[in-house]
Image (spheres, coloured by chain):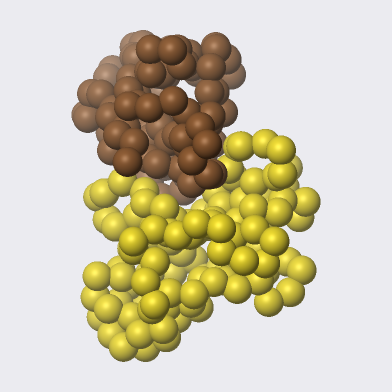
Amino acid sequence: GIQVEQSPPDLILQEGANSTLRCNFSDSVNNLQWFHQNPWGQLINLFYIPSGTKQNGRLSATTVATERYSLLYISSSQTTDSGVYFCAVSLTGGGNKLTFGTGTQLKVEL
Amino acid sequence: EPEVTQTPSHQVTQMGQEVILRCVPISNHLYFYWYRQILGQKVEFLVSFYNNEISEKSEIFDDQFSVERPDGSNFTLKIRSTKLEDSAMYFCASSQVGTDTQYFGPGTRLTVL
């Protein structure tokens, strides 16, 4: 099956710092989503981004489908950004199920 | 904004008991999914459902599991005889026809003792 790898696995930032999270995937995809799992365990949709670039406030994401990676940028990080960030993909022609990466655990400190 | 809802938020059960986890997908969505996340691990696909039948299921989704859409709004996951290893967070998700974005509910934390 498709492999989805995320890096780094853990990240500690000072409040106000910027960061880049990476998601590599091993096959062509028709869906890529970024999620933030908050401390209560809820999965919050951040972006649907199978290709191109999107921005939402302090967050932006870029997917280069031909090179099979996606990047999530967090600028001016806040303590509320802490949690686990997952990317998830579904295969082109492979049905709709999402395959999740192992996540990046982010901690933002004061 | 419409949301996927799930009940209960936390369920504690004894090994061997049956549990039913409930979900109300977003009203105009027609694709429904269940995923699970064992503590500290990644989220795993269990099953997808469309047009009143299972469209895909994973190896995890064995004969102990079943899904049902008993009425026009609810979507349920039943575990017939729970095992200790079924302890996990279970997420329901839904999506519209013609789009790929899946929207997730807040999850049900299942604890099997």
In which quadrant of the rendered image does the N terminus of chain B lie? top right
Q: Position of residue B42 (x, y in %)?
A: 31, 46
Quadrant in the picture for residue A5: top left
The yellow one among the chains is B
- Is A8 positioned to the left or the right of B102 in the image? left
Q: Position of residue A79 (x, y in %)?
A: 38, 28
Instruction: Tell me if I can see residue A41 in this picture.
Output: yes
Residue shown at 43% from the left, 12% from the top: A66
Residue shown at 59% from the left, 45% from the top: B103
Q: Nearer the viewer, residue A54 or A59?
A: A54
In which quadrant of the rendered image does the C terminus of chain B lie? bottom left
Q: Position of residue A109 (x, y in %)?
A: 28, 25
The tint chain A carries is brown
Residue shown at 49% from the left, 41% from the top: A94
- Is A35 positioned to the left or the right of A13 in the image? right
- Is A37 positioned to the left or the right of B113 in the image? right
Q: Position of residue A11 (x, y in %)?
A: 24, 24
